[in-house]
Structures are given as structure tokens and as C-alpha cells.
Amino acid sequence: MAVDAPMANAMRLRNQLQTVYKLDPLRNEEEVKVKIKDLNEHIVCYLCAGYFIDATTITECLHTFCKSCIVKYLQTSKYCPMCNIKIHETQPLLNLKLDRVMQDIVYKLVPGLQESEEKRIREFYQSRGLDRIIQPVNETMSPDLTSSPYTTFDHSKAHYYRYDEQVSLCLERHGSSLGKEKGKLVLQQKYVRCSVRAEIRHLRRVLCHRINVIDQQQVQILFDNEPLPEHMTMKQLWLLRWYGKPTPMVLQYSVKEKRGR
């Protein structure tokens, strides 16, 4: 007896689905086991031969490395260590991007790696007597009070930073501008940490607020007695004037006396 058309279509569809299940192990109901060594070439850093920690990808060629490894490597080179492509003409660090998806994959694939790294970081801070402050990935998201690690410290006392690269500065009062006002208009805390994207004009605005100067035109930011351009970024300044020198980068500021009419 001939099989009717609807039944034939159903059987054909079933056969196609069975073929898909056989070809694609991700859709198969049976558990598929993969050896970690078969994935090592995708999750091991080319520079240190260890599993990715703070996985960071070069946007030009999409090769991934540990953040500390690639940042250290690019201090003396502008080329990718794997494919030798030029990352950037002058500022290769600007073409690096944290790869959180890759890092999550590595932590899920390698047993105990995340716990080991957390323990190492915790011991580092404890050995130096420092408070570790963790910034949520999405500050607008309501944290889970039962499992979120961000509920272990007081948010009101925390300092929040962007995930930009940071630069440390030391702001000294210019010697020739002290005059009779020695001790006045001097920063109580001369060390500053800010984003490499910050510009001189932003730094001057913060400085005026700290020393209670209303007119920003009274204040100048200098490097080696030379006034700096308003729109120069900290990254440009560091590369042009401070590359290879120990941190913090030292800048001076001068305050002009406001003359009466």
C-alpha cells in the first residue's frame, strides 16, 4: 500500500533531523567529551605559553594574548608577535581590547584556573596592605545580594574608574611662581590617577577645583617649564615626553596673580 503524502513528508523530515544530530555533536542529546589539549591552541597565550589571564585582543588582526604579556611586549614593538602586522604607527596600546567572552570561556574550560587567579590577586593585595576595589561590569544592573561579589565593600567609599588605561601623575607647584605665596595654593595631595584619554584642560579644571581658584585662566600646566596645549591627552604627553621613565609622570602648575583694575 502506498504511503500518503503527509506521512512521507514526516518520515523525510525525521530522517533529515537524524542526519543533523549525527553531524552536529552540539545538537546531539548524548554528552560529547573533548580533551582540553585539543583546544589549547585557541586558549593559550603565544607569549607566555599559559592559559589566557585578562584575555586581550589586537583589533587589527584579532590575535589574543594575556593583557600583561601583550602590554609588556608592545613597549618595545609596534607589531603583532604572531602575524607581524603593524598594530599602530605610534600608539599600539590604543588598538587593544579586553576580550571578556574569551576569558569567560577559558575559565569555564580550565578547572580551578579562575579560583587560582583570584587567590593570587587576593594574596597580592593582602601582602601590601591594600584594599581591593572591584568595579561592576554594568553599574546600572541591580546586583544579586546572595551571590554578587560587589556587595562585600561599601560602594559609597569606592573610587570608580573606567576600563581605560590609567596614568599616574605628580603635580608640583612651579618654583618660580611661589613668591610670597609660599604654602598657599599648593595641593595637599599632589598625586593623581586619571585616564590616558584625559586632556590638559580637564586636568586644569580639576586642579582649579582642588586649590580653590575660580578663574581657570590663572592656572597653567607645564612640563619642564613649558606650557602644555589645552587639548593634548595624557597618552600623547606620556609617549612624547615620558616614555620609558618611571611613574609617576611629573608635571608642574603655575598660578598667576590676579591683577586689580
Image (tube, rainbow, N blue to C red):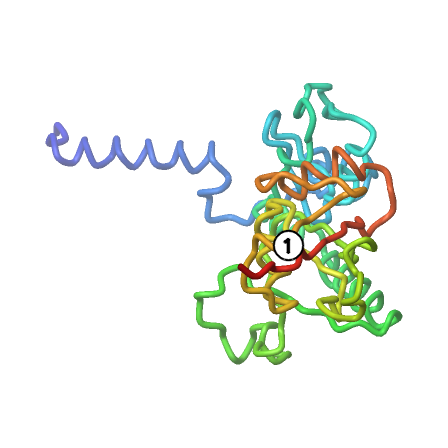
Please tell me which residue is depicted at 67% across the width and 40% down the height of the picture.
228
Depth order, front residue of 202/135: 202
Q: Position of residue 6 (x, y in %)?
A: 12, 35
Image-quadrant location for residue 73: top right
Q: Which three-letter amino acid code belongs to the residue tagged 1?
A: Val
Locate residue 104 relative to residue 222 in the image: left or right.
left
Task: Work out whether 224 lies above or below 60.
Answer: below
Locate residue 100 relative to residue 255 in the image: left or right.
left
- Image quadrant holding the N terminus, namely top left
Judging by the rendered image, the residue that carries numbered circle 1 is 219
Image-quadrant location for residue 94: top right
Image-quadrant location for residue 64: top right
Please tell me which residue is depicted at 62% across the width and 78% down the height of the picture.
157
Q: Position of residue 2 (x, y in %)?
A: 12, 27
Task: Work out whether 176 lies above or below 214.
Answer: above
For disc 1, the neighbor class at 10 Å (few under 14, some 14 to 19, many from 20) is some
Please tell me which residue is depicted at 76% across the width and 51% down the height of the picture.
252
Depth order, front residue of 247/38: 247
Q: Position of residue 106 (x, y in %)?
A: 66, 48
Task: Work out whether 260 lies above or below 19.
Answer: below
Depth order, front residue of 34/249: 249
Depth order, front residue of 1/74: 74
Q: Position of residue 184 (x, y in %)?
A: 74, 70
Locate residue 43 relative to residue 148 in the image: left or right.
right
Please tell me which residue is depicted at 71% across the width and 20% down the height of the picture.
83
Q: Secondary structure at mark 1?
A: strand
Q: Which residue extends farthest front?
A: 261
